[in-house]
Amino acid sequence: MKERIIKSINGQREFFRSQETKSVKFRINQLIKLKKLIKEKQSEIEEALWSDLRKSPEEVYLTEISVVLQELDNHIKHLKKWAKPQRVKSPMHLFPSTSSIVCEPLGVTLIIAPWNYPFQLVFNPLIGAISSGCCAMLKPSPSAAATATLIEEMVKELYDPNYIDIVLGGREVNEALLEQKFDFIFFTGSTALGKIVSKAAAENLTPLILELGGKSPCIVDSDADLDITANRIVWGKFINAGQTCIAPDYLFVHKSVKDTLLTKLRSKIAEMYGEKVTESRVYPRIISSGAMDRLKELMNEGDIYCGGDINEQERYIAPTIIDNITPESRIMQDEIFGPILPVMTFENITEVFDYLDSKEKPLALYYFGKGGKNIASRTTSGGMCINDTLMHIANHNLPFGGVGSSGMGKYHGRDSFLIFSNRRGIVNTPVWIDLPFKYAPFKYFKLMKRIL
């Protein structure tokens, strides 16, 4: 496998040097080809994600296919404008030079994707790579095997491997890839794996973007609209059975409204998934038995308010709310990444601030109430929603990514084009005049000091 990877990277470097990928027309054509194939393969994509995570066709379209198609449309529409050299002002002391910024592709790139949104999180970064004019090596997660196999078929159908290639496999393949020198690495996954990728990239001084996770808080204040709040929390927490990097990880609710909110949350779960959630056609499953074991251990503290049902054979864990959790509880130490919502209470918002200040910066932060501006100014996170969950990821005009331990670098929309590009500053100086000010022995130094 290592020899195959090295051969592919060398082939991509040779193809990149041909300058073909720098053509904006070429890039747009590759994006159009991808869009067409995704539409043709929609039913196969749905089947693969049902096999891996038992996602319903509706959820597959909303959270995977439509996200990629919207990103494609955005890049196809705006790429010519983004790729056009940007003229910028030149200060007087550079006269008669002109200055511009040219976005040039970084080169041969590596995209490592996770299993929780295995289709979207391969193709969304790939759109940025294609849009910027890069070549790319794709590495989907083996945990979502059916989707990875389908993506491999699609990539091989669409692209020459000297342009876009894909390798399947586990840890040994990741290690072989990370031993190689790429011009850019895009990684989505856990913080622990992100550290490994970051260390490997440092060996070659390779720039990278890390899309990680963390414990994203969901704060509900005393003046929140509890009906709407419950609806949006249940949707955001339990979509994909909680296996979402920006899912509300835990609930921090004002003591005065906690009981009412919990009642409404339980009711909303029944409305969305039925009284017998295990029979619901639209409730997904946990990715693996190993993930099941980890999640089961997190349910041993506190008091289960609702849910708690487990079927190991089906990899099923019911939407579960756990009350009477403390900051010291095990479930509050690491990202949950499953359908379990622990609940803590506060009486004064300063308690929330103090708690958040003592923790790592989260990937997302959610606040329900009338004090959204105050919360936004007093806290930090990769992204934030006020009176909603997850929806900041749906706007391709917003940069998406983490901060601190929840990640580095932003993408989506134009940001995806930029992260795979080198913003090259160029000064163009004509030769029809050669002003003597800058030359030794600095005869006009006093005048230059005034200009500078």
Image (cartoon, rainbow, N blue to C red):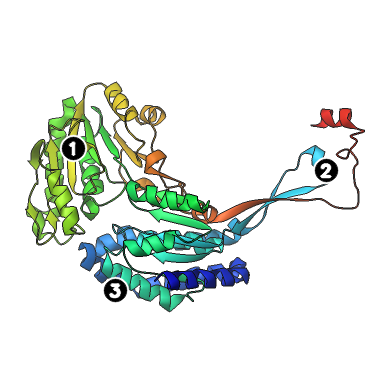
Q: Residue at x 42, y 62 (%)?
A: 177
Mark 3 belongs to which amino acid?
Glu
Q: Is residue 282 left or right of residue 409?
A: left
> Quadrant location of residue 78?
bottom right
Mark 2 belongs to which amino acid?
Phe
Q: Number of marks in the image?
A: 3
Q: Position of residue 13 (x, y in %)?
A: 56, 68
Q: Position of residue 170 (x, y in %)?
A: 31, 64
| Label 1 to label 3: alpha-carbon separation | 40 Å
Label 3 Cα neighbours within 10 Å, binned few <14 / some 14-19 / many ≥20: some
Q: Nearer the viewer, residue 206 or 335?
A: 206
- Residue receiving disc 2: 95
- Residue receiving disc 1: 330
Which of discs 1 and 2 lies nearer the camera? The answer is 1
User: Would you say the residues marked 3 and 2 are in contact, meaning their CB atoms lie under 8 Å apart?
Assistant: no
Q: Looking at the image, is 230 positioned above or below residue 416?
A: above
Give the quadrant of the N terminus.
bottom left
Mark 1 belongs to which amino acid?
Arg
User: Would you say the residues marked 1 and 2 are in contact, meaning their CB atoms lie under 8 Å apart?
Assistant: no
Give the quadrant of the C terminus.
top right
Q: Is residue 65 visible?
A: no
| Label 1 to label 2: alpha-carbon separation | 64 Å
Looking at the image, is mark 1 or mark 3 earlier in the sequence?
3
| Label 3 to label 2: alpha-carbon separation | 60 Å
> Circle 1 sits in a helix, a strand or a loop, which is it?
helix
> Quadrant location of residue 54?
bottom left
Q: Is residue 197 visible?
A: yes
- Residue receiving disc 3: 44
Which of discs 1 and 3 lies nearer the camera? The answer is 1
Label 2 Cα neighbours within 10 Å, binned few <14 / some 14-19 / many ≥20: few
Q: Position of residue 331 (x, y in %)?
A: 19, 39
> Circle 2 sits in a helix, a strand or a loop, which is it?
loop
